[in-house]
Amino acid sequence: MELKNTEKFRNACEVASQVFTKINVSAYADLQAKLDYCIGSYDYDKNPVGLYEVGIVAMNELESFKTKNPRKVNKKVIADLKKFSKN
């Protein structure tokens, strides 16, 4: 995996975490905590495995949430997660 794209995925995950904060749905609190933990872990050891696992779950949850609440999630957040998760 290319480090540059991993960094972009990490940044997309950080934006996704901010979106979870903004939408403030308690059902996503655990996922957001895991995402924040994986971002911090990646920053520490540069091992992206957990970041990708949780980031993809976050992407799927945001996509699902967006179908029911189209104005609450910017499509660029999901697009960036998709784009950089495939590298």
Image: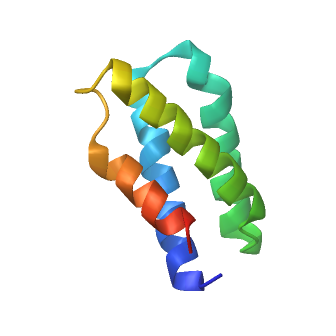
Residue 25 horizontal side relative to residue 41, left or right: left
Q: Residue at x 54, y 39 (%)?
A: 60
Let me know if residue 1 appears in the view: yes
23 lies above or below 58: above
Q: Quadrant of residue 58?
A: top right
Count how many numbered circles sit on residues in the image: 0
Q: Quadrant of residue 70?
A: top left
Residue 79 horizontal side relative to residue 30, left or right: left
For the rendered model, the colour scheme is rainbow
Residue 67, given in percent of the width and then of the height, sits at 36, 25
Q: Residue at x 55, y 63 (%)?
A: 85
Extreme residue toward the top, this view:
26
**Camera-side residue of 34 and 61:** 61
Residue 23 horizontal side relative to residue 25, left or right: left
Q: Residue at x 71, y 67 (%)?
A: 48
Q: Residue at x 56, y 14 (%)?
A: 26
**Rendered-image quadrant of the C terminus:** bottom right
**Rendered-image quadrant of the N terminus:** bottom right
Let me know if residue 36 appears in the view: no
Residue 18 horizontal side relative to residue 31, left or right: left
Residue 4, given in percent of the width and then of the height, sits at 51, 83
Residue 75, given in percent of the width and then of the height, sits at 29, 44
Residue 50, given in percent of the width and then of the height, sits at 75, 56
